[in-house]
Structure formats: structure tokens, C-alpha cells
Amino acid sequence: MIRTCIVAAMAMLAMAAPVLGEGRQVLGHGRLVTNDLLVGNKDRWQSGSVAGSHVVGSGWAGYLPDRPFDILEYRIGAQVAAPENLRTPKATDRPFAGLFSVGLHTHFAKGATEFALGLDLVAVGPQTGLMDLQTGIHDALGVAAASKRVAQDQVKNDFFPTLVSEVAHPVAVGGNSVLRPYAEARVGVENILRVGADLSIGAVGQGELLVRDPVTGQRYRAISQQVPGFSYVLGGDVAKVDSSALLPEKNGLQLTETRSRYRAGVHWQGERRSVFYGVTYLSEEFKAQPEGQYVGSVRLKLKF
């Protein structure tokens, strides 16, 4: 699987070479912070993540170009997955895992069909420093941090080239409402195939580039237009899971064969400020997980 990702990365760079040298400008930035504490007083499983995007290209006309690599998104991410109890976890619970990723993605369209293709290099384990960061934050807040046992049992150091692809076909369903069915594949740190859809109601987000957060599936604004108002979003997807380096079988963990995510959120755009808040339900990821969980996602853009 890793060899497949390396070959795919080489192919992407070969295709990108003719256009990487062309004049480009910064088109936008995007970010999304997700944490289960944003929707409840629990710190478990998909505990928290940060996704960030920096988009460059020769220009933005309010729609995707028809060539790959005309739009380039440089992506960075960090993610913490943890057992339900950081002090005395059950033997059947998931191990702590810290992930840090950097990647290059491109977005384009053929007719009414939209495509996203990218490659991330994902570092996993103590080398990311995310357990130390979480411990420092917990100590500052007076919250229990991971025990020595959790630290010793965490997912070990490794690197995973991860190929990400998405195909979508937006359909206008009246007024400023758009239904966007899509399919997504991820091959690398986790091997997953998803199908789902997102519904957006409102002007905010129209004519913009929105990119998908890997944990929740929420789409955050990476190229924005200053159109004041609100947009409301609903979405969901179902995934077939083949394997996961975050849930090692040697620990006796059994993956759930499918995962589902259901999400809702609201975008607000003012003259100088914008806010997004969303809530996502994540179903169980392994068979010993007693229930799903809710996580909250937020993005603030404030200019004074």
C-alpha cells in the first residue's frame, strides 16, 4: 500500500511539474479546530484536531479551474485520538495516537463534476510531540493528563504516505441551496472508502473553495468571498474501513466494518468577521467502543 502511495506521489509531481513554475498568488487560507470539549465535557477517542490550508493559484473566478494543479492547496494537520480514560484505560480501549501531517492537494472540475486529489505525509507516534502538548495543556487547566501506562502503550513512531481523493457532483436544489453528493478514498494511515452528501443553504460559501476536514467531514472555507449573511450546512457519510494503523490488531482491537458521520453547522459572514460552528456525530470505530461521540468544530476570522 505504501508503494502504491509513493508511485502516486511521483505521478502527481510529474503532472504538476509543468505548472508549478508558473506565476502564482495567494488565494486564501482556511482552518478548522475540532474538539469534543466544544460540544460536551468529555475528552476521549477523537479528542481533538486542527486542520489548516494555504491556497495559491494564478487567480480565482468563483469556480474551479478545469486543469489539475492550477489551484494548489498546502495542507497541515494535527490530530489526537485517545482512550476514554487517560489515567486508567480499559484493556479493550484504543491506544493513544498523535498524528501530524503535511500535504499537497489540488482542486479542479470537469464539467459539473468536482475533483480533489492530494498526498499527505503523516507522522504518527511520540515523535509528533502531541502527547507532551496535550499534557502541558491539561496541566495548565488542572485536568488529568495521560498516565505513564497510556504513554507506554501509545501507537509507535511511523510514517505513512496517504493518498486522498474526492469526486463530487453539486446540484442546485433551489435558491441558494446546493446538494453535493460525493465519494472519497483514503489510502495510507487508514484505508477507507466513503460515500455521502452535503447540503448547503444560504449565500455564504457560494463561489468559494471549501475543503474537507479529515476527522469530521465538515467543509471549511479556504477561498472566501465577502458576502454577508448566513449559510446552514447538513451532511453525512458512510465509510467502508479496510485497515487502520491507529487501531492495531496486535492490541486485540477489532475494527468496525463501517463508520458513519452526521454533521450540521452554520457559517456567518459579516463585513470584517466570520464565524463557523459545527457539530458532528462520529459512530464507533472499533467493536469494543461502547458508543459513538459528538465533537464540535469552530473557525473564527476576526479583523478589527
Image (cartoon, rainbow, N blue to C red):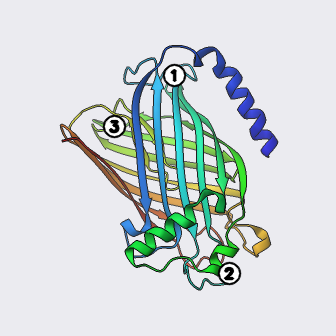
Position of 214 relative to 10 (above/below):
below
Residue at 34% x, 54% y: name it: 265
Q: Earlier in the sequence, mark 2 or mark 1?
A: 2
Query: Could you tell me if residue 93 is visible in this image?
Result: no
Residue at 46% x, 44% y: name it: 52
> Which one is nearer the viewer's eye here, 145 or 51?
145
Query: Could you tell me if residue 108 is visible in this image?
Result: yes
> Which one is nearer the viewer's eye here, 281 or 201?
281
Q: Which residue is mark 2?
A: 92
Give the left or right position of residue 32, taking residue 290 as reference. Answer: left
Residue at 46% x, 31% y: name it: 55
Give the left or right position of residue 276, taking residue 161 as reference. Answer: left
Q: Are marks 3 and 2 in contact (CB under 8 Å)?
A: no
The secondary element bearing badge 1 is classed as loop
Q: Earlier in the sequence, mark 3 or mark 2?
A: 2
Residue at 53% x, 55% y: name it: 215
Q: Which residue is mark 1?
A: 111
Q: Earlier in the sequence, mark 1 or mark 3?
A: 1
Instruction: Give the numbered dot on residue 290.
Output: none
Position of 86 relative to 297 (above/below):
below
The secondary element bearing badge 2 is classed as loop
Mark in the foreground, 1 or 3: 3
Amino acid under disc 1: Gly
Q: Point out residue 54 in the picture as x, y percentages from the top left corner.
A: 46, 35
Amino acid under disc 3: Gly
Q: CA distance from mark 2 to mark 1?
A: 48 Å
Q: Point out residue 33 in the picture as x, y percentages from the top left corner.
A: 42, 54
The part of the image, by quadrant, that contains residue 240 is bottom right
Instruction: Give the numbered dot on residue 205.
Output: 3
